Image (cartoon, grey):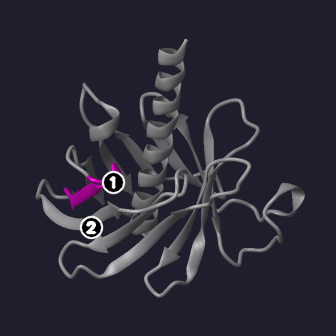
Amino acid sequence: RTFALKERPLSFTGEDFDIVEITNNNEEDFVRVRGAMLHLPGKDKMRMASSSSGENLVTMDRVLIAATPSYDLYRSDGTKIGWIEKKLISFMDTFDVYMEGKGGFGVTGLFKPTPAYRIEGDFLDRNFSFKNEEGKIVARANMDSWIQIDMMNHYQVQVAGGMDACLVLACVCCIDEEFDEEHQERKKKREEE
């Protein structure tokens, strides 16, 4: 399945995306992601809802106190699916997706479960792949146009059969928000110098 993920240029939260399925060259509304209107700095919350029914499907909740940027992922009934976090020590930017109930205990060090998915690639150009535990690529995301600005990114996301499309799309939204925040911090530091 193939999706077009479009960040909305006009947004009160800066975290709004419209996602359409384009699998058969046929644009069909799939889900909407909307950020929370009121939140603490560094404590983002986004909700993914079905475009057709409006039903909440996934909530992405930024973890306030964490060694690296992390988001908890919840289903509509409040059940935790898992979490995505930026890898602390790595030669290149890498994100790991952990599934709830997959072993391990605690959230640090040797006691973490094995990541269900590893996300790696060229995050500067926003071109990255999701790999499962066996190292097979199960999804890809890449920028969808030549000129991109942080407040209006567009991605094309391909998801393999059997893979949870909502999980992949939620992770792409989290990664986009993380890199938008990093770019804003770097820009602010440059302006202060």
Query: Local crowd at mark 2 within 10 Å, few (<14), some, or many (≥20)?
Result: many
What quarter of the picture does the C terminus occupy?
A: top right
Q: Residue furthest right?
A: 110
Which numbered circle lies on residue 67? none
- Kindly identify the amino acid type of the residue bearing the numbered disc 1: Thr
Q: Is residue 96 above or below residue 166?
A: above
- Kindly identify the amino acid type of the residue bearing the numbered disc 2: Val
Residue 90 sits inside the magenta stretch? no
- The answer to whether residue 36 is left or right of residue 152 is right
- Relative image position of residue 143 (x, y in whole percent): 33, 36
In the picture of the structure, the residue carrying the numbered disc 2 is 31
Q: Which element is circle 2 on? A: strand
Q: Residue at x 33, y 49 (%)?
A: 14
Q: Is residue 48 above or below residue 140?
A: below
Q: Which element is circle 1 on? A: loop
- Relative image position of residue 131 (x, y in whole percent): 57, 52
Q: Is residue 93 in view from this perspective?
A: yes
Residue 13 sits inside the magenta stretch? yes
Q: On the image, which quarter does residue 55 sit in?
A: bottom left
Query: Toward the viewer: 11 or 5?
Result: 11
Q: Residue at x 71, y 54 (%)?
A: 66
Query: Toward the viewer: 127 or 58?
Result: 58
Q: Is residue 117 in view from this perspective?
A: no
The answer to whether marks 1 and 2 mark residues whose Cβ atoms lie closer than 8 Å is no
- Relative image position of residue 86 (x, y in whole percent): 64, 47
Query: Toward the viewer: 14 or 18?
Result: 14
- The region drawn magenta spans 12-22
The disc, 1 or 2, on the residue closer to the chain's N-terminal end is: 1
Whole-number angstrom distance, CA of label 1 to CA of label 2: 17 Å
- The answer to whether residue 84 is left or right of residue 177 is right
In the picture of the structure, the residue carrying the numbered disc 1 is 13
